[in-house]
Amino acid sequence: MTAQAIKDRVQTLRDAFAKLAPTIADPKTKEILLQPASNSMDDIETLYLPAARNALTPDGAAMFIRMAEFQIGQAERQLKHVHDLIAQYGADLRAIG
């Protein structure tokens, strides 16, 4: 996957995040459920893609791209999980923790 393809997927995830966030009524629940996906997207944009761009070798760049791809998967799974929870329990769901 190219850096541009990763950026495009992150933007798609950010759009999904923006649609999910207002549907959760409780602020603490919103933070607990959505923060992991937000952290993954932030890491991709601020850590992995710049590191890939500045890597000293092609293998180093490829490693950071693979790490970004892994984080995309993590964010996608988290957002799907949140979507499924909202579908099952509604916007008034509460996280205990």
Image (tube, rainbow, N blue to C red):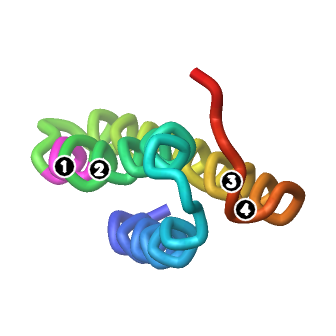
In the rendered structure, which amino acid carries the disc numbered 3?
Val
Residue 59 relative to residue 86: left or right: left
Query: Mark 1 sits on what residue?
Result: 46
Give yes or no for contact between labels 1 and 2 (Cβ–Cβ under 8 Å). Answer: yes
Magenta run includes residue 50: yes
Residue under the point 47% across and 78% down? 15
Element under label 1? helix
Tag on residue 82? 3
Chain-order first, disc 2 or disc 4: 2
Give yes or no for contact between labels 2 and 3 (Cβ–Cβ under 8 Å). Answer: no
Badge 3: residue crowd in 10 Å (few <14, some 14–19, many ≥20) = many
Quarter-of-image position of residue 96:
top right
Q: Residue furthest top?
A: 97
Residue 83 relative to residue 43: left or right: right
Query: Mark 2 sits on what residue?
Result: 42
Tag on residue 33? none
Give yes or no for contact between labels 4 and 3 (Cβ–Cβ under 8 Å). Answer: yes
Chain-order first, disc 2 or disc 3: 2
In the rendered structure, which amino acid carries the disc numbered 4?
His
Q: CA distance from mark 1 to mark 3?
A: 24 Å
Query: Mark 4 sits on what residue?
Result: 83
Q: CA distance from mark 1 to mark 2?
A: 6 Å
* Along the viewing direction, whichever of 44 and 93 lies nearer the viewer: 93
